[in-house]
Amino acid sequence: MERVTGIGGFFFRSKDPKALATWYDTHLGVNPVPTQYNTTSWETEAGTTVFAPFKQDTTYFGTKDWMLNFRVRDLDAMVAQLTAAGIAVEVNPETYPNGRFARLADPEGNPIELWEPEDAKKA
């Protein structure tokens, strides 16, 4: 069976796409979509990607229909960077078998989860 090889993009509506793209670039290092074909797009590192439909009535994402989960190498360093920029981040105090997590929202209220996989700092 032929299979997909990864996620090629994540597309969603925004009140101010340019400002939101700049926020993701500035605070999370997600390069904006190139305006020319010879410009580099954001590239992810190889690693686990979870594709998980949730029940319709889940409260895990708040009031949104989706949530982004980004893998990070050092959750504490990322949280420090974000809080220094005035961004509220809630770190889950529990360490799970698959790693550690923190939550924040982008300027439009879209939920973001940061995930430091159990073996992230070993890599």
Image (spheres, rainbow, N blue to C red):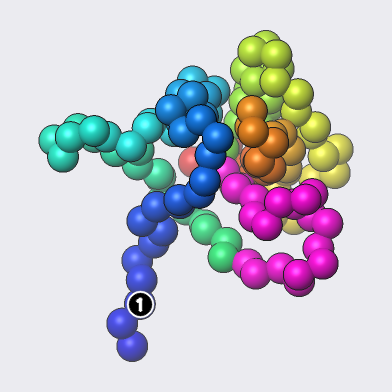
From the image, tell me which residue sits under label 1. Answer: 3
Number of dots carrying numbers: 1
Image x and y of residue 86, in percent:
70, 14
User: Does the image show residue 123?
Assistant: yes
Q: Name the kind of residue labelled 1 in the image.
A: Arg
Work out whether residue 17 or residue 68 is closer to the camera in this orientation and state it: 17
Q: Is 44 located above or below residue 54 in the figure?
A: above
Q: Residue at x 77, y 50 (%)?
A: 63
Image x and y of residue 77, in percent:
63, 22
Q: Residue at x 76, y 71 (%)?
A: 55
Work out whether residue 75 or residue 109 is closer to the camera in this orientation and state it: 109
Majority secondary structure of magenta residues: loop
Q: Quadrant of the N terminus?
A: bottom left
Q: Residue at x 46, y 33 (%)?
A: 17
Image x and y of residue 34, in percent:
27, 34
Work out whether residue 96 or residue 28 is closer to the camera in this orientation and state it: 28
Query: What's the magenta region?
Result: 52-71
